[in-house]
């Protein structure tokens, strides 16, 4: 049993992968709690797919340098977030419709740009489906830095974001800057999605953002407890997923998300049994 646990840890890429999964799990669970409470899952999914043009542009401009892809994805994510808000605030179109329009347009643009790269099927695959075991030290520092930034902002605006998430009408009554807080939360979601890009890729990012927080929401309605439970689930899912990936030779991003889904189904099933 000890050998089973220690054997993968002899490889530096495995240690970096575990550290990255812990960092990503923490920030995704914290921001995911707000996403679940505000019912913004579709927004998160759309934003995850909307960063695809940034990845493609980064590849075309920098020739596949991962740091460049990260920054271009971040710029595209923030741009998409602000564009969705601008459309929903200046027209009769509601946010869900604006999300659908931008999601389809940006994702299509990303596909069009990627199709111009002759070797895109090989070089960009890990950005679509994740490659956490391929993270190098510079990428790990980027993940750590942006994760810390997101958490610092959350701590600074914790009470305001909590009121906004549970009752936006109360937030307006208390004269909180609702529009500004909404923009801050939207930008934090965009940054979080880009941070988790290397872990599970564009296709599965929303699962890492939503599933641990949704699992925690089945257990508690208190925000702090929800965040702590979500973080715990994310960390365990990340470690379990990486070990499954190592021993079963399956995609690391998919195995991490499947571990998260397993926790969700277990909690849901256990609660269903208790209600009988």
Image (cartoon, rainbow, N blue to C red):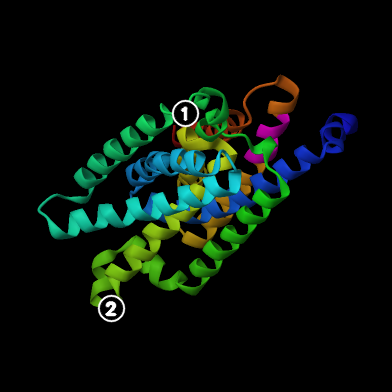
In this view, which residue lies farthest toward the bottom?
A: 175
Q: Which residue: 66% across, 33% down?
A: 241
Judged from the image, the secondary structure of the residue bearing numbered disc 2 is loop
User: Which residue has dot 1 on it?
Assistant: 117
Q: What segment carries the magenta color?
A: 237-243
**Which is the main secondary structure of the residues drawn in magenta?**
helix
User: Does residue 12 belong to the magenta stretch?
Assistant: no
Residue count near mark 1 (Cα–Cα under 10 Å), binned few <14, some 14–19, many ≥20 = some
Residue 82 in the image: x percent, y percent? 31, 57
User: Which numbered disc flags the more N-terminal residue, 1 or 2?
Assistant: 1
Residue 186 in the image: x percent, y percent? 37, 58
In this view, which residue lies farthest toward the right?
A: 3
- 233 up-or-down from 8: above or below: below
User: Which residue has dot 2 on it?
Assistant: 174
Mark nearer the viewer, 1 or 2: 1
Q: Which residue: 43% across, 72% down?
A: 159
- 172 up-or-down from 50: above or below: below
Nearer to me, 20 or 169: 20
Image quarter of the C terminus: top left
């Amino acid at each position: 049993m000890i050998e089973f646990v220690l054997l993968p840890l002899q490889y530096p890429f495995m240690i970096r992968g575990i550290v990255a999964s812990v960092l990503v799990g923490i920030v995704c669970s914290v921001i995911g709690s707000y996403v679940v409470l505000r019912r913004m899952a579709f927004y998160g999914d759309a934003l995850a797919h909307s960063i695809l043009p940034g990845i493609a542009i980064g590849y075309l401009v920098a020739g596949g340098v991962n740091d460049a892809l990260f920054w271009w994805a971040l710029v595209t994510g923030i741009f998409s977030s602000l564009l969705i808000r601008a459309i929903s605030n200046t027209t009769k179109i509601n946010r869900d419709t604006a999300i659908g329009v931008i999601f389809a347009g940006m994702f299509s643009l990303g596909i069009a740009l990627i199709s111009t790269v002759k070797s895109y099927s090989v070089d960009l695959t890990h950005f679509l489906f994740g490659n956490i075991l391929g993270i190098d030290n510079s990428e790990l520092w980027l993940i750590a830095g942006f994760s810390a930034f997101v958490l610092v902002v959350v701590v600074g605006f914790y009470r305001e974001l909590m009121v906004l998430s549970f009752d936006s009408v109360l937030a307006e009554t208390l004269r909180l800057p609702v529009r500004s807080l909404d923009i801050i939360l939207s930008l934090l979601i965009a940054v979080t999605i880009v941070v988790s890009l290397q872990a599970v890729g564009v296709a599965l990012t929303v699962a890492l953002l939503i599933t641990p927080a949704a699992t925690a929401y089945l257990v508690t309605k208190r925000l702090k407890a929800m965040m702590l439970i979500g973080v715990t689930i994310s960390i365990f899912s990340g470690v379990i997923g990486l070990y499954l990936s190592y021993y079963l030779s399956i995609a690391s991003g998919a195995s991490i998300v499947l571990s998260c889904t397993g926790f969700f189904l277990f909690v849901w099933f256990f609660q269903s049994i208790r209600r009988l």
